[in-house]
Image (cartoon, grey):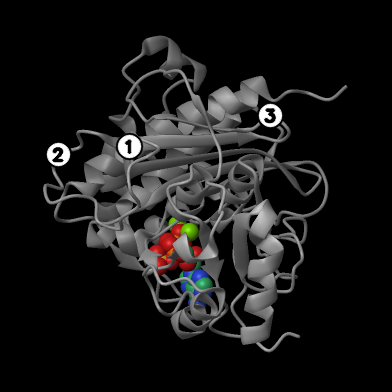
Amino acid sequence: MASNYLKELEVALLAVQRAVRLTKRVFHEKAKGTVSKDDKSPVTIGDFGAQALIISALKANFPHDEIVAEEEPAQLREDAALRDQIWELVRNTKLDDAAAEGLLGGSIPDVDAMLDLIDKGNSKGGPRGRIWTIDPIDGTKGFLRGGQYAVCLALLEDGQVKVGVLGCPNLPVDDSAPLTADIGANQSDDEGRGVLFSAVEGQGAMSRPLGTGGLSEGKTISMKPITNMSDASFCESVEAGHSNQSESAQIAQKLGITNPSVRMDSQAKYGSIARGAGDIYLRLPTSKTYQEKIWDHAAGDLIVREAGGQVTDTKGARLDFSVGRTLASNSGVVAAPAVVHGQVLDVVQQVLGLK
Ligand SMILES: Nc1ncnc2c1ncn2[C@@H]1O[C@H](COP(=O)(O)OS(=O)(=O)O)[C@@H](OP(=O)(O)O)[C@H]1O
Ligand SMILES: [Mg+2]
Ligand SMILES: [Mg+2]
Ligand SMILES: [Mg+2]
């Protein structure tokens, strides 16, 4: 019998809520314990700590499920100082609500157990069974810049996204607040900021205030109907190396869009268009070799589709989460309200020379 994923959703929301408590502590620190990975991208004590806490909650509730998570503990096994900083954060981060905290399982016993948990995110992924995918901090560069970032968790079953949760600490709580990349002049003031987006396949998409212990009531969200393409705006990556910005400018022009693109880091882009604060998310490949990672897209893909959107790659194919840790069979992302997706894709393909 088909499950309605109630328990999965609750655990995922609480696990993300708790992980965000940890990342916010690091966000407000000057020194974020940043190290460079083999691919030269940054990772911080916040990424590692959030991954440990989320995997701990998943293993306590769903011990047989597999996990594909972004970070690996190798660097920490060689760096005692970094490892101890993370452990300090992990053992001191709890939800305010004891019942909610209890649902996430007991405390992690020691620093070695924490490293082992981080390592449990090493599944190869694939087309069968239940696989959770975690991006403990998506938009790490934005996190370091003081911008948008997201804590991302999704459940795949036989390659299909069933549950998706995005914790976006720096987006406004208000679904109708105008879309800006800026998080406000006073970055130490969290007033009015922090939202949890979620979706379950076939059950719609929701948003609720992020909070710090237990879940408040969610509200159904939906994409903004575009009646006139010239009023629409694009939501894009900040990093020019992550999405081709000159091609997107040509696409905007062909569609008659004159509003400047809103550039923000992370899957906050998917959440923002899902609640109608933005309209269209484009991610145009900058290299033939880079493969998008499943943890960068799974939760956002479901949240946008459940809010009335369509998400494909630039070839028009649905994102395929069943081929491993990457979206090896896809190229880029085009996410838009379902009624105009075809029109947007058509122009994307003209500009990219795909038709
Ligand atoms: N070359 C290239 N092309 C496309 N995407 C890349 C590339 N390199 C990295 N990444 C991934 O981009 C993730 C962040 O994406 P964003 O859309 O948030 O980009 S931005 O940096 O904030 O502008 C980022 O996720 P995190 O590492 O979780 O921050 C990376 O997985
Ligand atoms: Mg990411
Ligand atoms: Mg990340
Ligand atoms: Mg990263």
Q: Is mark 3 within 8 Å of ligand 2?
A: no
**Sequence order check, earlier mark of 1 and 3:** 1
Q: Residue at x 32, y 31 (%)?
A: 91
Helix, strand or loop at disc 2?
A: loop
- Circles 1 and 3 in contact, beta carbons < 8 Å: no
Pick the residue in front: 177 or 328. 177
Give me the C-alpha separation between circle 1 and circle 2. 11 Å
Residue ranking furthest to the top:
99
Q: Specify the amino acid type for callout 3.
A: Gln
On the image, numbered disc 3 is attached to which residue?
203
**3D distance between C-alphas at marks 1 and 3:** 23 Å
Residue projecting furthest to the bottom: 353
Residue drawn at x 25%, y 53% as measured from the top left: 81
Point out residue 185 in the picture as x, y percentages from the top left corner.
12, 51
Q: Nearer the viewer, residue 206 or 213?
A: 206
Disc number for residue 189: 2
Query: Crowding near pointer 2: few (<14 within 10 Å), some, many (20+)?
Result: few
- Asked if residue 251 is positioned above or below residue 34 in the image, the reply reads below
Residue highlighted by disc 1: 194
Percent of width and height locating residue 121: 58, 48
* Image height of 98 relative to 265, above or below: above
Where 222 sits versus 255, above or below? above
> Which marked residue is nearer to the observer: mark 1 or mark 3?
3
Q: Left or right: 183 with respect to 101? A: left
Q: Residue at x 39, y 31 (%)?
A: 18
Whether the residue carrying mark 1 lies under 8 Å from ligand 1 is answered with: no
The answer to whether 222 appears left or right of 141 in the picture is right
The C terminus appears in which quarter of the rendering? bottom right
